[in-house]
Every structure is written in structure tokens, then in C-alpha cells.
Image (spheres, helix red, strand yellow):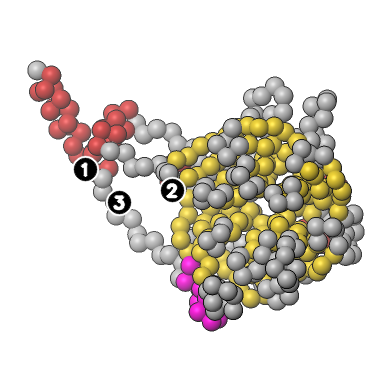
Amino acid sequence: MYRKAACIVLLLLAPFLTAAGKTKDNPKVLLPPDLLLPEGRKLTYERSFRAEKDVRKEPGFWGKVLNVVAGEPEYRELIRPYGIAVDSHGRAIITDPGARGIHIFDFEQRKYKFIERADKNRDPMVAPQCVAVDAEDNFYVTDSQSGKIFVFEASGKFKHVLGSLKGGEGYFKRPTGIAVDSAAQRIYVTDTLRDKIFVLDMQGSVMQTIGKHGTGKDEFYYPTELRLDEQNTDGHGGEKHDLMVVDAMNFRVQRVGRDGAFEGAIGQVGDSVGSLFRPKGIGIDSEGHLYVVDGLSGVVQVYDREGRLLYSFGGRGQGLGEFQLPMGLFIDRHDRIFVVDSFNRRVQVYRYYGLSKQARGATP
């Protein structure tokens, strides 16, 4: 009797299971064409993702049966994503102030995790903004509202908070950009409302500050994102590691040394390609090119070390290869470019194919 009942159930479910395994007859999606660049370089579009289901494994037969009977599980989605970093295992760590938490997408292991601390009595995480990863894949998240920095282990387990004062308030007025120099054991944080960069040791003590309010060299007007230029050396193979700082209301990106000395600036005010009006996320590829997101135009602009515009990609829209209010950007060790397409509630991934080391004259 039970076998007969089971057969009846499967027969009733068969049309739904068959349909679930087929691709819907949607119009063919056009992928952005490759951008062909000088000397054989190119930029290609790889993929986009927006939700937990994009990384999870496809359910098996009985999983599909369960989904038909009980309904599909509720998957988390990006709500208002902002910052992004990618660790040494290729996991994308995305801050989402709209969800008051952090999404971790692990495509290699087909896993997803969401981290939040909104209900904690002490040190709740309210508005996670930017994120950086150290050499051990611990990640550091600025909270622009609480004025603190939250530190998590690679597993996602909470470690501690930097900048939490005795009364519960945060030391920083509006911490935004963050970078971690594991070799030097230093953390760099932009405090946007103070127009400064704070240099911390790994325990959170302030070692020095860089910059002040103004429009001149080594002066800032609402600094936001920052990135450590690990491709830059002293010319003799030694480390130099300048900081690239988005000087938002001065409409430029400044390069400063770790000692705070001004090294140069890229950009000028304007709303055309080659100018910066709403500079947001930045990143540096393996050839030292600087990528700058312009949130207003929805374009990513790419510059060489001398500040010359090489090319740009993107544009305002909802299609693949288009952006609406893009924010964060990160370039991993494989030259994959992750762009947080905030208003479209997704991340788009590109890949830059540069010259080989041999072609650049480097030692194999």
C-alpha cells in the first residue's frame, strides 16, 4: 500500500520535477563583448551574482521533490551591497549596510554564509561599509555609523572590535576605507568626517595620522576608499607600498607614502570619461594599473601609474556590463575584477588578461 501511494505521489509530481530540470525559454542574454586592448591585452566579462542560490549546489532529485512539496527555501540576497574583498581562497566578502551584515560567497566550495551582529547588546554592527583582508584571511570591516572596526576570523567567527570606547561609542567619526599591511603590522583607516587617515597597530592603537582638511597636496576633503599598492616597489626590488586614497570631494585619487608624504594625484572634476565626479571603489591590477569606479556615470576608468587614462568600461543601465550606482571594487591575484553594482543589487566579475611576465621583461 505504501509503495502504491509513493508511486502515485511521484506520478503527480513528475510534471513539476521535469519542468524544474529544464531551462525556461527566456530570450537569449547577450554577454558584453571582450574589450580588446593594445599589445594583446584584453578585458572579458565572466559572471554576475546576487543571491545565496547563485553559489549553492543544484538540489538532487529528492531535493527537488522536497522543494515542490514544501516550497523552495528562502535564500538571502544582496540588498544594498557596498564594499568587497576577496581572500586567498577566492571567497568574496561583501558588506551590505542594507542587510546590516556581511555576505560570504565561496564558489569553489559552493558555500554561503551571512554574518550579522545587529542584536548584540555590546558592539552591534549597524552599517558595515568597507572590508579588507590580512595575510591570514582574517577580515576587517568598518562600520560608518557605530564608528568602529569589526574583526573576524577567516571562518567568519567574531574576534574583537577596534575603536570601541568605554561608553560604547566608537572612536572614529565615520570610518570608511580600510587597508591592512600584514608585513608592517599596520592598519590604515580613512575617517571621512575628520578628513584624515589613521594608522593603527594590529591592536588598534593609533600610531600616526595622515592628512588634514584642504584641497592641496596631502590634504583631503571627505576621503573614503583606500587601497595599498602592493605592486609598487622602491626600484630595487624592495617594498614601497604607497596608499591610494579616494579624495571624494576633491574629485581625485591621491597617492601617499606610508609615511604620509604626497606622491601624486589622479583625476579632475567633471562628468565625462577621464574626469571624476563621484569616485568610489578602487583597485590595482598585476601591471599596476589603477581602476576607479565613478558612481555617477556608472563607469570604471583605468589609469596607468602616471595618471593617463588607458580605457574605461561599463555605463549606466541594468544589463550585463552596465552599472547603477556602482560602489566597491576589488582585484584578486588572478586579475579578476569584482565590481559591486549596488543599485542593481549584484556583483559583476570581469577578468583582465595582461602581458605575461616574460613579455614585460620580468624574470620568469
Q: Position of residue 140 (x, y in %)?
A: 67, 42
The residue where tag 1 is placed is 18
Q: Which residues are magenta?
A: 34-44
- Cα separation, mark 1 vs mark 3, equals 12 Å
The disc label shown at residue 108, or none: 2
Residue in view at x 85 percent, y 58 percent: 260
Q: Position of residue 322 (x, y in %)?
A: 54, 62
The disc label shown at residue 24, or none: 3
Q: Of 105 and 298, which appears nearest the observer?
A: 105
Mark 2 or 1 closer to N-term? 1
Helix or strand or loop: what does disc 2 sit on?
loop
Is 32 placed above or below 344 here? below
Is 251 placed above or below 142 here? below
Mark 1 or 3 closer to N-term? 1
Residue 35 belongs to the span the image colors magenta? yes
Estimate how packed mark 1 is, as few (under 14), some (14 to 19) or many (20 or more) residues with alpha carbons within 10 Å.
few
Residue in view at x 65 percent, y 68 percent: 288
